[in-house]
Amino acid sequence: MSVHYEPLRSERLSDVACCPGGLELQGKRFRGDLTEAADWRLRMFDLGMRGVVAFDEDGPHGFAEYMPAEVAPVPIEAPGAAVLMCYHWAGTDPEDPGHLAEERKLIERIIEATRRGFTGLVTQGWDIPTHFPIPLLKGLGFREVARHDPIALMWNPYRTEVREPTLVSASYAPQDLSSEGLLAIDATFSARCPYSIDSGTRLQEAVSEHPLSARIRMTLHRIDTREDAGTYAVPPFDWTWVRFNGEEVDLFELPGEKLSDEITKRLEELS
């Protein structure tokens, strides 16, 4: 397979796999307004986000993005460093880790692009083999400096004297209204990712259509800016989370009608 690389351009955001027109969205149904994913990137470009797009014989296939840590919408402090925001080779198969080799090449280009102008590169790593895997990052010179399971804060310093990045403490306080017989749902989403837009929209629909919606109090926050991240994001990098009366819930484990069923179950337990 022949692959070549070009700079990420604000006027060609359809080259980004996760924007409207991109490969990741093709053949899939997403809820919500996915044009927000492109609009968010335009705003981030104004703040200094840059990146690279990988093209194969069929067109744009993968991408990677970075931006200065001082303005990046993540809850970390890393003065002088860059943040590796997102990287993805579209069409990944959990049973076939072959995409990781292409993602490694994308990250290598981000390292090359940031080495001169920044003190280091910071990003997230996950304890899963197919998405932001920690071993892949360690193989590129990153080391783990903090953790909030299953996510680790990964650091690749370019200078020996630079200090490690630190986390901004989570300042949100999820509600617990169980004593009132109510279900408090606190959740976040971000326009940076179509899957996050879909999750936020799906949760809104499930609550509004639920027959017991009068007993639900939902607060849905956006994490699109650095200020948002300092207020609502879970360190070190988690900008999509859900709490039912303060208890963590994974929407990916509640597909389809299971989400509505889970809400019903929680309400019945409060009766």
Image: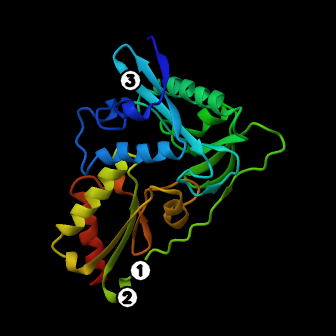
Residue furthest to the right in view is 161
The image position of residue 250, as x and y in percent, is 39, 58
Q: Say if residue 230 shows up in the picture.
A: yes
What amino acid is at disc 1? Asp
The image position of residue 23, as x and y in percent, is 32, 29
Residue 221 left/right relative to 33: right
Determine the secondary structure under disc 1.
loop
The answer to whether the residues at label 1 and label 3 have Cβ atoms under 8 Å apart is no
Determine the secondary structure under disc 3.
strand
What amino acid is at disc 2? Ser
Residue annotated with mark 1: 176
Residue 214 left/right relative to 55: left
Mark 3 and mark 2: span between their CA atoms?
52 Å
Determine the secondary structure under disc 2.
helix
Residue annotated with mark 2: 179
N-terminal of the two: label 1 or label 3? 3
N-terminal of the two: label 3 or label 2? 3
> In the picture, which quadrant includes the C terminus?
bottom left
Where, by quadrant of the figure, is residue 48 drawn?
A: top right
Q: How many marks?
A: 3
Residue annotated with mark 3: 60
Query: Along the line of sight, which residue is nearer the eye, 250 or 154?
Result: 154
The answer to whether the residues at label 3 and label 2 have Cβ atoms under 8 Å apart is no
Residue in view at x 37 percent, y 13 percent = 57
